[in-house]
Image (tube, grey):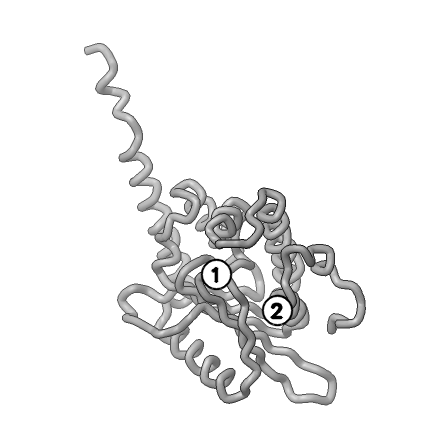
Amino acid sequence: MTVDATSKQWWDDYDDVVWAEFARFISDESNATAIKAFHGHLIDGLFQTQRYAEAVIRTIPLQNRSPKSIERLVAVRLRRQWQVLERAHRAPIEVVLDEAVLRRAIGGREVLREQLQHLMSVARQPGIDLYILPFTAGYFPAVDFYLHRSEQYGRRARWSLYTENELETVGTRDDPFVVELMLMLWEKIRQHSLDSDASLCLIEQVIRQLDNDMVLQLPNSSAAMPQ
């Protein structure tokens, strides 16, 4: 079902925090019949927990950093998740994350652990494929990016490219040549990534390492006990 660009959409209620380019991204995402993404810095926004999303948004140098604006940006992210993930069985989502993303303690270790547990749960849903690009794969020069496929009756399917930088500014590239290059790059990155099962095993391994680190940081209560 295609969203009517002339009718009021849910993100219009957040026009104080959703700028025009981001609104176009959300609209395209809502209409996409397939989504591919690569992230080398953060967990994909569609997979973030509320606490992880809050921690991420607090680091962005916004013009308005009031608690209310942060709360509304988090609400937009969670609403996107609800809109997109519930139809993943008919609009598949494929995401590649760099291994570094799993180990970057956004919001602290407890928030990261919660996030990784949630990531495993989401990755098991029908229509969602998650791949981890391991450190052993080497370096791939790529910004974080999304590729959205849209289909209209009587027309050939087309892909749109959206990129993100450290400010989370969404940039759009409609040049077919550039889009095709990024499709090829995404496929190359995926080929060097772990498959879905191995990716989940790596996430479990990172969670165990976090658990061990947190145990080691606990006070040694036995030392305070009378002998």
- The answer to whether residue 36 of the structure is visible from this angle is no
Compared with 84, 56 (above or below) is above
Q: Secondary structure at mark 1?
A: loop
Compared with 80, 111 (above or below) is above
Residue found at the far right of this picture: 7
Q: Quadrant of residue 9?
A: bottom right
Looking at the rendered image, the quarter that the C terminus falls into is top left
Q: Identify which residue is drawn at 58% across, 74% down.
A: 148
Residue found at the far front of this picture: 63
Residue at the spot of label 2: 21
Specify few, some or many for label 1: CA neighbours under 10 Å numbering under 14, 14-19, or 20 or more: few
Q: Identify which residue is drawn at 53% across, 72% down.
A: 171
Q: Identify which residue is drawn at 53% across, 54% down.
A: 62
Of residue 77 and residue 190, the one placed in the foreground of this image is: 77
142 relative position to 21: left or right = left
Q: Which mark is residue 167?
A: 1
Residue found at the far left of this picture: 227
Instruction: Give the amino acid type for the residue marked by disc 1 in the picture.
Output: Leu
Of residue 63 and residue 81, the one placed in the foreground of this image is: 63
138 relative position to 102: left or right = left
Q: Earlier in the sequence, mark 2 or mark 1?
A: 2
Q: How many marks?
A: 2
Residue 172 in the image: state x and y as whole percent: 56, 75
224 relative position to 108: left or right = left
Residue 57 in the image: state x and y as whole percent: 51, 51
Instruction: Give the amino acid type for the residue marked by disc 2 in the picture.
Output: Glu
